[in-house]
Every structure is written in C-alpha cells, then in structure tokens.
Image (spheres, helix red, strand yellow):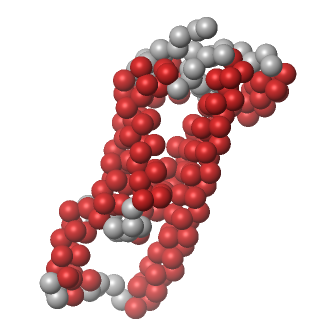
Amino acid sequence: MWDPLVRISHWLIAVAVIANGLLNKPGGTIHIWIGWGVLALLALRFVWGFLGPAEARFSAFPPDPRAAVSHLIDLVRGSPRHYRSHNPAGAIMVYALWACLVVVTGTGLYMTGAKSPITIAEEKAAVAAGDWSVLVKDDDDEKGEDSKVLGEAAKEVHEIAANLMLVLALIHVAGVAVESRATRRNLVRPMLVGRIKDK
C-alpha cells in the first residue's frame, strides 16, 4: 500500500520531530541540521505527491472536512469504510501536520537568516574563539529594530507551531490505534512494510 519513499519520509520526519521537539537544544547546530533535513524531506514528499504512485498522490486524499466528519461518525457507529490511501480524517491530519512543518521550518529559516548549518557552526566556532565580528550586522538602526520585532514574532510562531505539531502527532497516533481496532487491520504494519494484511 505505501511505497518506500512515503514510509521512509514518514518515519524520518517522525524521528526529527521528536528529536527537535523534545531532545535537542533549540537553536543548536544539531537542531538546525535536523530542520534542514526536514525541509528536504518535505520538498521530496511534496514532489512525490504529484509524481508518486496512486496512494501517495494528493489526489488520493484531498482535504475534505465533511468527509472527515462523516468518517468519524461511521467510526463511532462501528462501520468505518476501508481506504487504500488515507481515510478522510487521516487526510485532514496529514495536511495539518504538513502545514505545521512548513510553518516551523519557514520560521526556523527566518530566525537563522536562511544560513546553512555549516555557516552557523562556523560563526559559533568563531565567537567561541573570541571573534565577535561575525555577529555584526550592516543594517541601520530602524531596519534592525523592525528585524528584531519580526524575529521575536517568528520565534513565537515557531514555538506555537512546534507545540501544536507535537499535540497533533499524539492525536495522530491515537487515531491510528482507534482506526486499527475498529477496522481490525494493523495500520502501522503498512507504514513499516508497505502493505495491509486483512484479517
């Protein structure tokens, strides 16, 4: 059911979210490296949403709130439909998680001036060695003040989106567990090996 690119990108992004959300120091070099990795994975997955196999394409799981509500009602009634791709509620969750990832990586890029992790590591090493000149900016005072305000706003949005993403990820895991039980299908298995085994 799920091709290798979908599975690998799913698990790598999951590990990255856990690592950057719960384990790494915010703004640290590893945090930034992982952020760039997520950005690359997102770009690859978005391209795959147009070029990949049928189940991976955006057309297979359009965001449809009415269909999602209908699916949840069917789930509560004990008669959920089976889908080859994401069910409508799962589709909404996928798009919500992607939106959070786009916001988190976008604000992260803004906060770091879109500098590569290598450049940031070099600047930190220079400062640690006593060379503070790498931190001097050529902006005038007015532009610098505007930039500071935007930077604070970006930081706030970054943190809110990251926390929201962690909450959504927990809901996603719970939803997979409930759906697996209701449909009597192990929905984690296809994300590991690529296919569903019906009982």
Q: How many marks?
A: 0
- For this orientation, the residue located farthest to the right is 77
Q: Is residue 144 left or right of residue 70?
A: left
**Residue found 51% across the figure and 80% down from its top:** 149
Please state the horizontal and vertical placement of residue 186, each as a whole percent of the image.
57, 20
Note whether 15 is above or below 182 in the view shown: below
Note whether 58 is above or below 162 in the view shown: above
Q: Is residue 98 left or right of residue 4?
A: right
Q: Is residue 55 left or right of residue 32?
A: right
Q: Is residue 192 visible?
A: yes
- For this orientation, the residue located farthest to the bottom is 141
Please state the horizontal and vertical placement of residue 99, each as a whole percent of the image.
55, 47
For the C terminus, the quadrant is top right
Which quarter of the picture shows residue 169? Answer: top right
Please state the horizontal and vertical placement of residue 63, each as a whole percent of the image.
64, 32
**Residue found 61% across the figure and 45% down from its top:** 170
**Residue found 57% across the figure and 52% down from its top:** 166
- For this orientation, the residue located farthest to the top is 199
Note whether 30 is above or below 175 in the view shown: below
Note whether 153 is above or below 100 in the view shown: below
Please state the horizontal and vertical placement of residue 171, each as a whole percent of the image.
65, 42
Q: Is residue 46 visible?
A: no
**Residue found 46% across the figure and 62% down from its top:** 107
